[in-house]
Image (cartoon, rainbow, N blue to C red):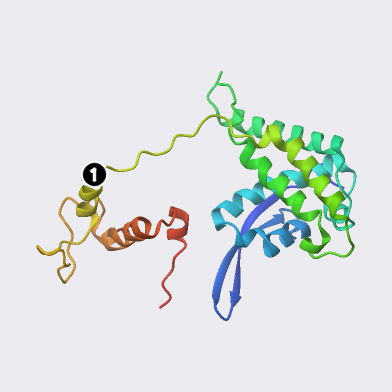
C-alpha cells in the first residue's frame, strides 16, 4: 500500500440514446483507475442529487478519505467497505482529525503571512465524506452482497453524525443576499433586455440598448440566461449546463 495515493477528478462523457452527460469521476493519478466505492456512490446516488460542479468538489473531499485509509486503516478502503466492515469510533475520530489537518494546511498555504486559518471549508470537505460512509454501510444501497441489521445500521449512522458534528458545523454566519428593489429590478430588466415597443413587445430584428454592459455577441445569450434565472430560479451552474443541440 503506498503512503498516500494521489487522486484527480476528471470529466467522463457518458453517451446514451437520450443524449450525453459529462460526469466528474475520481481516479488514481498513477493508474487512472477509479476507486470502486466512490464510483458506485456517484453512479448509484450522488449524480442525481447535485450539479457536476458540486459533485467535483465532493469527489475531491472523498479523495482525502482514501488517502486517510492508505495511511491509517491498514486495509484497502474499497475492500474494507465492500466486506461490510464499519469504522470504529477511534477510526472516525482519526479521520476527522486528518480532514481538519489537511484543510488547515491547504487554507494556510493560500493565506497571506501571519493570517489565521478559519477552517471555513472544513464542513464542505467533511460532509460528503460522512455521507459516503453512511451510504456505503448498507449493502442494499451500495449494490453489494450481505445484510446488516437495521438497528446496527441506524446506530452506526448516528455515530457518524455525532463524531462528524464538530467538522460539519457551519463556521460563521452567512448573510442572505439583499433582493433587488422594484426600481432596481425594473432597471436591470430594461438594461439587459432587447428594445421593445410601447406595449412591451420586442422589436425585430432584436436590438439592445447602447448602455447594455455586455459585448454585442453575448447580449442575446446573457439576456436568455437572465430570463431563465429570474423566471425559473435556476442557479448559475444549472444555467451553464444548458445546451441546445443543433
- Residue lying farthest top? 114
Q: In this view, does 13 lie above or below 137?
A: below
Q: Mark 1 points at which residue?
A: 184
For the image, the number of numbered tags is 1
Residue 80 placed where, x, y %? Answer: 88, 52
Q: Is residue 102 visible?
A: no
Q: Residue at x 90, y 57 (%)?
A: 83
CA neighbours of label 1 inside 10 A, class few (<14), some (14 to 19), many (20+): few
- Residue lying farthest bottom? 17
110 or 161: nearer the eye? 161
61 or 129: nearer the eye? 129
Q: Can residue 233 be seen in this view?
A: yes
SS class, disc 1 = helix
Q: Which residue is drawn at 47% across and 55% down?
A: 237
Q: Is residue 221 above or below residue 70?
A: below
Q: Residue at x 24, y 45 (%)?
A: 182
Which quadrant of the rendered structure holds the C terminus?
Answer: bottom left
Residue 104 placed where, x, y %? Answer: 65, 30
Amino acid at each position: 500500500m503506498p503512503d498516500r495515493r494521489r487522486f484527480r477528478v476528471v470529466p467522463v462523457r457518458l453517451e446514451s440514446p437520450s443524449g450525453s452527460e459529462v460526469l466528474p469521476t475520481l481516479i488514481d493519478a498513477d493508474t487512472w483507475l477509479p476507486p470502486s466505492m466512490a464510483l458506485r456512490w456517484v453512479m448509484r446516488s450522488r449524480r442525481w442529487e447535485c450539479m457536476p460542479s458540486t459533485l467535483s468538489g465532493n469527489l475531491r473531499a472523498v479523495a482525502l478519505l482514501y488517502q486517510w485509509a492508505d495511511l491509517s486503516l491498514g486495509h484497502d478502503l474499497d475492500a474494507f467497505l465492500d466486506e461490510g466492515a464499519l469504522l470504529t469510533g477511534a477510526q472516525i475520530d482519526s479521520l476527522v482529525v486528518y480532514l481538519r489537518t489537511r484543510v488547515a494546511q491547504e487554507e494556510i498555504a493560500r493565506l497571506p503571512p501571519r493570517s489565521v486559518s478559519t477552517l471555513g471549508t472544513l464542513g464542505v470537505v467533511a460532509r460528503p465524506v460522512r455521507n459516503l460512509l453512511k451510504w456505503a454501510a448498507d449493502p442494499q444501497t451500495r449494490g453489494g452482497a450481505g445484510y446488516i441489521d437495521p438497528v446496527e445500521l441506524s446506530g452506526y449512522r448516528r455515530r457518524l453524525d455525532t463524531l462528524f458534528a464538530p467538522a460539519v458545523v457551519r463556521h460563521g454566519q452567512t448573510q442572505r443576499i439583499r433582493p433587488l428593489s422594484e426600481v432596481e429590478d425594473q432597471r436591470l430588466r430594461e438594461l439587459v433586455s432587447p428594445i421593445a415597443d410601447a406595449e412591451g413587445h420586442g422589436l425585430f430584428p432584436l436590438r439592445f440598448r447602447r448602455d447594455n454592459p455586455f459585448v454585442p455577441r453575448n447580449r442575446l445569450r446573457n439576456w436568455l440566461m437572465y430570463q431563465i434565472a429570474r423566471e425559473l430560479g435556476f442557479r448559475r451552474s444549472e444555467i451553464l449546463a444548458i445546451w441546445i443541440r443543433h
